[in-house]
Amino acid sequence: MKIIAVGRNYLEHARELNNPVPSEPVVFLKPETAVIKGNKPFFYPDFSQEIHHEVEIVLKISKVGKNIGEKFAARYYEELTAGIDFTARDLQQKAKEKGLPWEKSKAFDGSAPVGTFISKSAIRDLSSFEFSLDINGSRVQTGRTSDMIFSFDYIISYVSRFFTLQMGDLIYTGTPAGVGPVHPGDRLTAAIEGRILLDFEVK
Ligand code: MG
């Protein structure tokens, strides 16, 4: 499986990092070794002094597709959850300055903790629902999917032009504003509409 992630999909987040608002999705990949499941801890890596949390809605692809039309895209995922797109912001900043690829800052081991998947039918309106991240019990990020620049269906359609989607692939759909550092000892708790789906510790 692979992880396809979209960057800068929420206006306020693009602005907080002084990035331009994209006219098409900013896309990058993470390998399977990035995934952390089952609320297992995230071990702070030794190559970064500035790991940031980015809470995101994660879609799980349920069937194979290529060049998927936007109006059919909803048929290609049945479940979703909340996940963290951990980012080594110090390495990413260096890469951005030099115009180099982002992999070391985005795709490292453990950079994609993913919560318990729920049926998309459990959500009344997929185009507008709330999700959040708490650190040690304090709210640090709140997002609403109606604030996405590119919708779930548009993202699926767009990325499937470049990458064949396979069962079990994950799509990280971008983070709202409020990203910031995590530290060893922090407890991260992510929820969709108040329902906790991810709860783990940074070690
Ligand atoms: Mg992200």
Image (cartoon, rainbow, N blue to C red):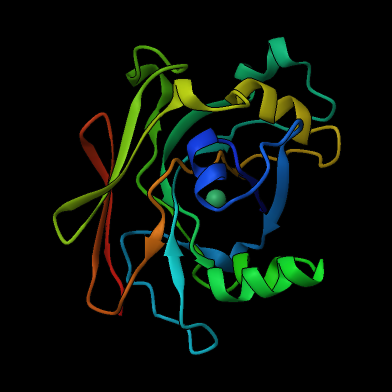
Above or below, comparing residue 90 to residue 140 in the picture: below
Residue sitting at x 63%, y 26%: 150
Extreme-left residue of the structure: 137
Q: In which quarter of the image is residue 91?
A: bottom right
Front one among 186 and 120:
186
Residue sitting at x 60%, y 32%: 62
Q: How many marks?
A: 0
- Report x, y in % for residue 112: 50, 59
- In the picture, measured across the screen, residue 157 lies left or right of residue 182, that is right
- In the picture, measured across the screen, residue 98 lies left or right of residue 185, that is right
Above or below, comparing residue 166 to residue 188 in the picture: above
Above or below, comparing residue 73 to residue 142 in the picture: above
- Report x, y in % for residue 104: 67, 74
- In the picture, measured across the screen, residue 59 lies left or right of residue 42, that is right
Which quadrant does the C terminus fall into?
Answer: bottom left
Residue sitting at x 69%, y 29%: 156
- Report x, y in % for residue 9: 58, 36
Front one among 179 and 111:
179
Extreme-bottom residue of the structure: 46
Residue sitting at x 27%, y 63%: 200
Q: Quadrant of residue 40?
A: bottom left
